[in-house]
Amino acid sequence: MNFDPQVEASLQALMNLLEDEAPEMAQLLREGKEKGTEPHILLMSLMEFFRQRPDMAQMLEALTLQAFAPLRETSALEPLIPPEPIPVVMHPEGKSPKLNPLYEAALSEQIQFDRDIPELRTGPLPDGVSPAVPVDTDVRNPVALGDMLGRASQDVQEEQRARKDEVAALLADPLGADRIYALVAQEVRLQEDTRMLQVLSSTMVDLDGYRRGEMPALRSVPEPAGASLLALTPEEEAEATWQFLSTTQGRRTALRALRGLMWMSLTKEGLDVSISTEKPQPGKQILAYASWSLSMGEEHATQARFAYVDMAAAVLTKGLMEKLQERVPVTLEIVTVDTVDVRRVGWAARLIPQERY
């Protein structure tokens, strides 16, 4: 089988590393290649090898990441701009379109962690699910961030409950239906049926900044006092940290702090840096790119005392400075890494030329 030259080079680099670090594994692979062993037979041999030497599995993962690092960097494909998902595909036999299985699987994984994805919802929030709401803050403490996310969610729930009471009171009024119709009469011609009335009343519960079909807006929540954080149990700290790190809106919440930390560090390096809070666009010249992510283990398997935001800022800044070859005025863009399908999350950053440059 002929591979792309970059892939071939990375495979050879992996074999060279294995020769030095894991000669037994290298020998197994080399003999399999020389003898033309069937792939499934070779795979079974490798599985038996790892069963006897579980430590070697971790070593192989580390060596593979090291060997394929150049390939990952050169095949960034417009870093920071994830490909647009294709939610619907045509049925091969010409029947009605169906949900893309890959999109459905990715959505299922995201729901597992986020529970609520308001920008993809068309109906009301399911019972027992808390609103997913990001917070506008530069706080970096993971426990404090998780606490603030929880309180922002509670605030939205209370506002929704109050709005539901208003709608219920309106519907209880003999003229309630007519009043609801009047609210939308300029945009939609409605027939008087119960189902449409239910849909309308449900839609009226949506709040500014938290509407179905839209990305939730950042909300302001007071930073928790130090005393309240000290009163938390280790289990509560782990829960709060997990809430921050494992959810899409939690990682969005950290963007403001990341931008501030990285702007200060890049400025100290002598760079003329501006910050963009807009969604990165394709077609830009990329001067430098870096990412930092970590693998999520089981639920609540997070370190409440670990400075995730500070670590990410330091690694991203170092990565950008190592790749930046020209000291020109730059714009810093940062986005979240949300590859929950492989349980890796974090943040990525890139430098592009400033518009005026």
Image (tube, rainbow, N blue to C red):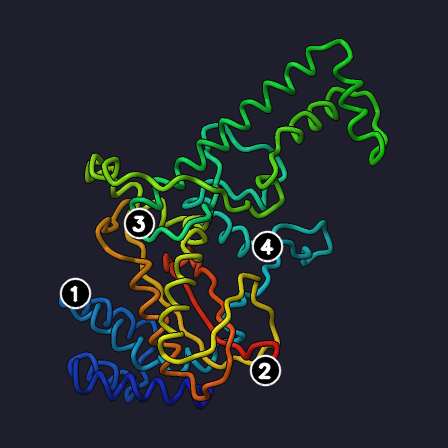
Task: Give the image quarter of residue 3.
Answer: bottom left
Closer mark to the observer between disc 3 and disc 1: 3
Q: Nearer the viewer, residue 133 or 117?
A: 133
Q: Amino acid at mark 1?
A: Pro
- Give the number of the disc on residue 142: 3
Residues at marks 3 and 1, CA–CA distance in whole angstroms: 32 Å
User: Where in the figure is residue 20, as x and y percent of width and height?
Assistant: 17, 86
Q: Earlier in the sequence, mark 3 or mark 1?
A: 1
Asked whether the residues under the numbered discs 2 and 1 touch, taking CB atoms below 8 Å apart as contact, a structural biologist would say no
Label 4 secondary element: loop
Residue 54 — which label?
Answer: 1
Quadrant of res 41: bottom left
For the residue labelled by badge 3, is the local secondary structure a helix, a strand or a loop?
Answer: helix
Look at the picture and state if 309 lies above or below 141: below
Q: Few, some or many C-alpha atoms within 10 Å of disc 3 (few <14, some 14-19, many ≥20)?
A: many
The residue identified by callout 4 is: 100
Q: Residue 357 — which label?
A: 2
178 or 32: nearer the viewer: 178
